[in-house]
Image (cartoon, grey):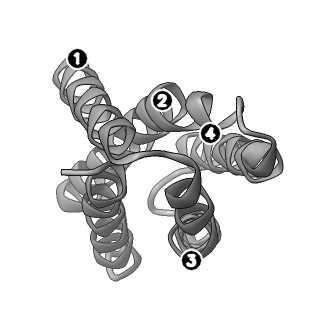
């Protein structure tokens, strides 16, 4: 498996969790469970992606700007998660912030899949793509187990 497939698999999990959460209401056990799973996925994914994908692309002039943009979006996602954490789940504001998070995450994933992956694909060889996927998957597993 190459890095792009590994990342896309996790992107799909994130999209699904966001969709499910957007359809929940109130402060329920299901909402809490799905939200915790989403947080764990997003936080682990950002860390593993930055360590096992972005850092290798910062060395390439053609990818520096895209990499910086991706890291900045990770920070914006973290801020939205902090806002959600500080908001009562039963409040209408919580769903509003969740929808903002959903839009930000979906924008970020689209940026990566439609632009960043193509640039990275031209800069990395097949062995690098496979090695990066291996490192990424190991990091994700470790992070999710410790979450």
Q: Position of residue 21 (x, y in %)?
A: 34, 70
Q: Nearer the viewer, mark 2 or mark 4?
A: 2
Number of numbered discs: 4
Mark in front: 3 vs 4:
3
How far apart marks 3 and 2 lie (CA) works out to 21 Å
Nearer-N-terminus badge (3/1): 3
In the rendered image, the quadrant that contains the C terminus is top left
Identified at 34% across, 82% down, the residue is 23
Residue for badge 2? 47
Q: Hey, which quadrant is residue 91 in on the image?
A: bottom right
Separation (CA) of disc 4 from disc 1: 20 Å
Give whichever of discs 4 and 1 has the lower sequence position. 4
Closer to the eye: label 4 or 1:
1
Circles 2 and 4, Cβ within 8 Å, touching? The answer is no
The answer to whether the residue labelled 2 contacts the one labelled 1, judged by CB atoms less than 8 Å apart, is no
User: Horizontal and vertical percent for residue 136?
Assistant: 32, 33
**Quick one: SS at disc 1?**
helix
Above or below: residue 103 compared with residue 108? below
Q: Label 2 vs label 1: CA separation?
A: 13 Å
Q: Secondary structure at mark 2?
A: helix
Q: Which mark is residue 20?
A: none
The CA span between labels 2 and 4 is 16 Å
Which residue has dot 4 on it? 82
**Rendered position, 71 above or below 90:** above
Residues tagged 3 and 2 counted as in contact (Cβ below 8 A): no
- Location of mark 1 (residue): 146
- Residue denoted by label 3: 114
| Apparent side of residue 96 relative to residue 21 in the rendered image (left or right) | right
Residue 142: percent from left, percent from top: 21, 20
SS class, disc 3: helix
């Amino acid at each position: 498996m190459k890095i792009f497939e590994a990342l896309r698999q996790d992107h799909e999990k994130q999209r699904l969790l966001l969709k499910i959460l957007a359809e929940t209401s109130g402060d329920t056990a299901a909402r809490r469970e799905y939200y915790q799973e989403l947080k764990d996925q997003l936080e682990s994914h950002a860390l593993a992606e930055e360590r096992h994908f972005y850092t290798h692309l910062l060395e390439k002039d053609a990818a520096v700007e895209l990499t910086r943009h991706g890291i900045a979006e990770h920070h914006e996602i973290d801020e939205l998660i902090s806002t959600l954490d500080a908001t009562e789940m039963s409040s209408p504001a919580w769903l509003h912030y969740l929808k903002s998070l959903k839009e930000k995450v979906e924008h970020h994933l689209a940026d990566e899949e439609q632009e960043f992956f193509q640039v990275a694909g031209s800069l990395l060889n097949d062995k690098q793509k496979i090695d990066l996927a291996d490192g990424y998957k190991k990091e994700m597993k470790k992070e999710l187990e410790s979450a």
